[in-house]
Image: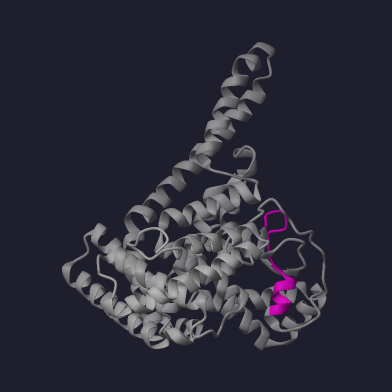
Amino acid sequence: MRLILIIGLLAAVSVPSRAEKHDTLLSGLLARDFQKNIMALPSGRAAYSRLEKAGPPARTLRILIRRDPGNWLASFSPEDNAVYFNAVPLAGFLGVKDASESAVALLLYRDPGARAALAGRADATFLHETVHALQYYLYPDYRRDVPKGVPLEFEYEAYLAETIYMHEKLSRSPERLRTFLRGGGRDVYTVAAMNGYLALSLDLAAYKENIRKMYEENTGGFISLGKAEELQHNAVENSKILAFASGRTKEYSDKQDSLNGVRREKEAYDKFLKDFYERRWPSFSAEALFFLGSAALEEKVYPLALECLAVADVNAVKQGVPAGDLRRLREKGALAILEAAAFIKDKASGMDPEALGRQLRALEKACLNTGRPFPGSLEAVRSSAYPKVFKFYSEKAAAEKDPGKARICAENAAHFRQLPGKPDGQ
């Protein structure tokens, strides 16, 4: 299940199945449109190939429109073998006021253009949910096998599939990315997929921790397979003596079967995730960051360009990329710093404190990470900007009612409280 923002799934939630007038016909139409788009890319074809091998359940997977009390963009229901698209954000995407299930479903049924738009923008979201469907087909007893939750690894796999697909999609049509960077094409489905794509490309550890925290701590109902194995092992050991003493060996046998199921799932996911994180991610990250950074530089979105190219530079050194590739990357990174510095110097007087602070901080971070000196031509601009940006964020932090946003404002205020290399208060 996919949250409207970046992450957030309540896998145990099932939207009640109701027979709507256009459900069967609309499901078939949407399935056709999604399959056409997704199978145009290598990772999409691989996903559908796995679904085909799953047998009859995959052939009866439905796509339905339902209102959901949560913030899910979409969700998979094992009980109904259906991917549900939440009618509320979908209505906003389609630009209609009536967010009732029947109205949204009827519009999609009658309007091929609306279906094409959904299949073209929500394809990564739908792929995410088909991965959850496949997981259920492969591990139908996971709710029995995994004590107290759904495997957290299920989400890691679904997000990886979605993000790799998004990279292929944008690489094939770079204009999609440039349009997004210019402020276009920012529908709720694209924004969600783009956020995940950037997060995975920049920092693998932070990406994984964000998913873990959102699902395991904030949402609840999730548990790592390692923790599940530990809990199930303890349960088996605790019941062993009592079970045989009382003659209730069936109960013990069931718990042992569950433990074996957890171990099989854990072994499969350990192998899959290890392969991606250790073998595939370094090259994926380098390729994605160079692609994103180059596009951002072309569109003069300097904070993003600086971050992507600087992180790619740091990662490339750690991973020992070929000298030619490293030189090409560093040339692009140096160009980004030069262009960003010129842009700030030229536009600083017309920028609001927040925008100026964002530009300066991105430039400072890129210089620090790549070992380049901060441009001397900007020292006067920086000296003048720091007090203004500090005042802006201090006041915003004091007025902000959302604790998370207030914390971010306070952190920015702390950064701009004094110039780098200057004594406190100067």
- Residue 87 drawn above or below residue 218: below
Between 324 and 48, the one lying in front of the other is 324
Looking at this view, name the residue that lies furthest to the top: 245
What is the magenta range?
77-92
Q: Locate residue 72: give its quadrant.
A: bottom right
Task: Decide which of 407, 233 is in the foreground and name it.
Answer: 407
- Residue 338, image x, y percentages: 29, 81
From this viewpoint, is residue 141 visible?
Answer: no
Quadrant location, the N terminus = bottom right
Q: Give x and y (percent) for residue 12.
A: 69, 50
Image quadrant occupied by the C terminus: bottom left
Q: What is the number of callouts on the image?
A: 0
Q: Residue at x 44, y 71 (%)?
A: 386
Image-based side of 201 in relation to 191, left or right: left
* 305 or 133, nearer to the observer: 305
What x and y, as percent, mark residue 392? 55, 71
Residue at the spot x=32%, y=55% of the render? 279
Magenta span contains residue 81: yes
- Identify whether 335 is placed above or below 262: below
Residue at coordinates 46% horizontally, 77% vertically from top-left? 356
173 up-or-down from 397: above or below? below
Is residue 7 among the parts visible in the rendering?
Answer: yes
Q: In the image as oriented, which residue stretches furthest toward the left?
A: 323
Provide residue 382's location: percent of width, then percent of height. 38, 74
Tell me: residue 160, above or below residue 184. above
State the scheme by which the image is colored: one colour
Q: Nearer the viewer, residue 209 or 91?
A: 209
Taking the magenta stretch, the answer to whether it contains residue 257 is: no
